[in-house]
Image (spheres, helix red, strand yellow):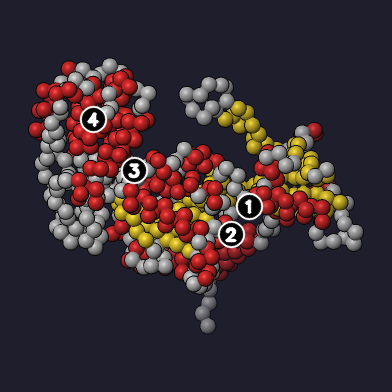
Amino acid sequence: MGHYASGDMLESTQTSSTKLAALTAFKEHCSGKLINTELAVVEGIRAIHPGKHVTTVAPRSVDLFGYAKAGHAEAKLITTGDSYQSLRAYRAPGSRMESGDGQLSDDVDFGHYEYKWNGEIFPMYHVAWADETMGLQSFHYILSDRDAGDAVHSVAADRLVIKCGKWSSELHEEIYVFDNGHWQKNEDLWKAVQSASWDDVILDPAMKETLINDVHGFFDNRAVYEEVSVPWKRGIIMHGTPGCGKTISIKALMHSLQDKGVASLYVKSFDACQGPQYSIRSIFAHARVMAPCLLLLEDLDSLVKDEVRSYFLNEVDGIESNDGICMIGSTNHLERLDPGISKRPSRFDRKYHYKLPGHQERILYCEYWRKKLSKRSDLGITDEVCEIVAKLTRDFTFAYIKELFVQALLAIVGGRDEDEDMTDASVSAAVDSVKVVEDSAKLAKDGEKTVSTADATSGDSGTEKTEKDSKPARQPRKVPEVEVPEHLQDNAFLRVLRKQIVALVKDMDNTTDEAAAPKPKIA
């Protein structure tokens, strides 16, 4: 048996004591009382109001404040005795272009209210707090007289909860938007959609009619699906070049379906602190509740990544019914989508290809702008001018043609139609030096043409390419040489527009096909 020297023994004892003290401190830390804020609030309210029944509801499903703001009830904050906690907030005007001093409001974290509904008065507390794991938590606590027999639930409070809950589950000039892991009602998006019309959508007439009939026909023919025992669900993919009409088509669909009672649900992102799978589950769960509905998934290739592909497809194909859900996914890159999504009927059944507008479509778009500018008769935008503009804007997206009209109009209004640096001579020189990129063929799949059917029948020249062809090289091309009749030589709008085309073609040459046209988001 070994022997320790007295010094070694003392050092060993001190080391053990130190370790034991550290372990004891750690155990004390881990044994701290766990605080459940929701339970603590309920217990506190019950202690203050021992004769009352407390009904707890979540504002996201029973929005008592929204219900009162809509005129169905009255909520009055009790401010006597400093019985509330709030943040005084200043909200500036919507933009600097609006006049006024802005508004003051109170964001209440803890408040005691007198809530009047249907001739009854319900004392109510609203409490909100930050939770480390769950984020912001918010609850309403409705007080009511205890029923006979000390029942678990209050009949009076439940009547209010049912009425307010039903109202809260409906859309009131709003559109549901999914972002940051939860659904929110968005009034601004609803307002933006109201201005969208199929008259604003310039597409090949046959494709436009087919798309409208496809979506509206789905919602109109539930009985037909049931008759043939086919699930009443549909999926559509809109794909193609940015700036060619996908977003405005979606907005027009949302607007035109409102009269049918079809709710619109717009998904911005799958990102959430709980993970993308939680988001996907929440999205489809809510869509099933809101059916019949239009479920919009913009930039589908960015949303459905490899790590969530199987989970997404399980929700699309799963054993839970998706009856009444029409999914519309949009993408600028069809080739990036998994074939299980893009080439599998019963998931996304139909694809609509938004190509560069053909000659006839460009004429229609120019006529659309002619009508918008009908009050400016001095511009001299005639049918003949529209024909010339259509020829000059070959390979332009609708987004670029819109920019062309806006800039030309601003130049005329600003008196810049005779700028020295943009004389006809300089335009001619620029025409000889400008290079543009041929329409990219990589958006085409399985032999689809990169030009529209309108171009094929209108005489627009150009080689049709498919994805199987080699990647097209950057080729020099001049701005189309179009003969302008003598009687239009002095047309101010046409002169300015030709100069703006040169500037835009230069811009197009400095970008890739993917970035050539700005892609507006719905929200």
Secondary structure of the residue carrying tag 4 is helix
Q: Tell me how far mark 1 sits from mark 2, CA to CA.
A: 9 Å
Q: Earlier in the sequence, mark 3 or mark 4?
A: 3
Say what amino acid the circle numbered 4 marks. Val
Which residue has dot 3 on it? 202
Q: Where residue 159 sits: x, y (%)?
A: 78, 53
**CB-based contact (under 8 Å), mark 1 and mark 2:** yes
Which residue has dot 4 on it? 385
Q: Earlier in the sequence, mark 1 or mark 2?
A: 1
Say what amino acid the circle numbered 3 marks. Ile
Secondary structure of the residue carrying tag 2 is helix
Q: Nearer the viewer, mark 3 or mark 1?
A: 3
Q: Look at 57% across and 64% down and name the residue there.
A: 19
Secondary structure of the residue carrying tag 3 is loop
- Nearer-the-camera pick, 440 or 40: 440
Which residue has dot 2 on it? 289
Q: Tell me how far mark 4 sits from mark 2, CA to CA.
A: 52 Å
Q: Where residue 181 sits: x, y (%)?
A: 52, 53
Which residue has dot 1 on it? 169
Q: Residue 421 vs residue 54: left or right?
A: left
Q: Earlier in the sequence, mark 4 or mark 1?
A: 1
